[in-house]
Image (tube, rainbow, N blue to C red):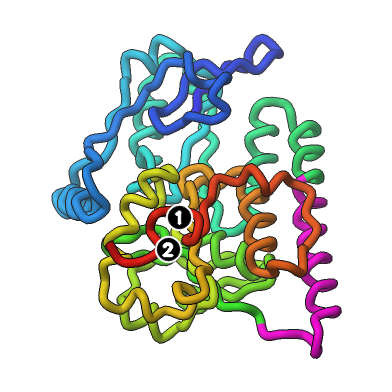
Amino acid sequence: MILLEAGTGDVQLVGVSHECDYPPLLVENLPQLTSSTIKFTSSAAVDTQVREHLATGAGLYAVDKEKLDELRPDVIVTQSLCKVCSVDYCVVEQLAAGMALRPTLVDTNPQSLAEVLDDLVRVGRALNLENEALAVRRKFEARIHAVQQGVVSVQRHHPGGPRACPSVVVLEWTDPMFVGGHWTPQLVSIAGGRHPLNPGTVVGGAGASTTVTAEALCQSEPDIIVIAPCGLDLEKTIQESKVLMDASWWAGLKAVKSGAVYFVDGNQMFSRPGPRLVDALEWLATIIHGDARVQVQGGVETFPALRLDDCSLKRPL
């Protein structure tokens, strides 16, 4: 949830959720209006807490209504995509309806990369900055197009003719295992791979992220595994991947044998439907095509990821 004041002609960010941490210089001193009832100890424990809360109808997040009334925002940017990931849209709608000066609500619910960019423009329109938002969108579309053209070129010039699209599995949670959904399989497709356990297409997203068994993961024989848990930074991602490394079936995976396993700050790069998904797309294109070097416009060298061979989890602990 993001609160904005736009009545004076200049847009001012006046409040954020407890999860809004980027860019740091912009948000670090702003009031946070939400808090979580879930305490992170481990992936398995969080999954249990979430399921228990949802089963009883209890909310996962709280909103500081007094602070919201005090800030009197003109616009609230919120979401109805996932009530596990952030404050439920219905809660925000109810709170906004009770305010003396009712703010404009911008609800984001993107299922694909194109819809993420649509939302960027919708937010701009709500702030009377539509032209600026359209200009930003065009820049991102140019980067996406560059990846698509690069993938076509790599495939066309591959020795021995076009190769089959590498199989990529993106894990959004480790215990239990969830595979990526919505825009994530689409990113894999655009980057020249395929996401067999929850397929997407170049033009559209997939369904929501879903649980997957060890048997199904093994049968999919992924060439590449990307571990990018929702809400976790890189350090916690590596920590929570130990449950996979300890499993008897893990070492037999083709991706593990070849070292094509990557740990990613999923919280920053895959989980949030925002501009940095284009960074994630460019990074995916570079790891899928390796030495072929798909030309990208972003700085993938700073992408928050580690390959299995570059960290301490090279083998079961």
Q: Where on the picture, by quarter, is residue 23?
A: top right
Mark 1 Cα shell of 10 Å, populated few (<14), some (14-19), many (≥20): many
Distance, label 1 to label 2, CA atoms, is 6 Å
Q: Position of residue 87 (x, y in %)?
A: 36, 38
- Kindly identify the amino acid type of the residue bearing the numbered disc 2: Leu
The numbered disc on residue 171 is 2
Quadrant (top left, top right, bottom left, bottom right) of the N terminus:
top left
Is residue 181 in view?
A: no
Q: Position of residue 158 (x, y in %)?
A: 80, 80
Q: Position of residue 291 (x, y in %)?
A: 73, 67
Q: Where on the picture, by quarter, is residue 138?
A: top right
Give the magenta-colored segment's residue range: 140-164
Residue assigned mark 1? 228
**Of helix, strand and loop, which mostly describes the magenta segment?**
helix
Quadrant (top left, top right, bottom left, bottom right) of the C terminus:
bottom left
Q: Position of residue 132 (x, y in %)?
A: 78, 31
Is residue 261 in view?
A: yes
Q: Is residue 86 magenta?
A: no
- Kindly identify the amino acid type of the residue bearing the numbered disc 1: Ala
The numbered disc on residue 272 is none
The foreground one among 142 and 294 is: 294
Q: Is residue 146 shown left or right of residue 255?
A: right
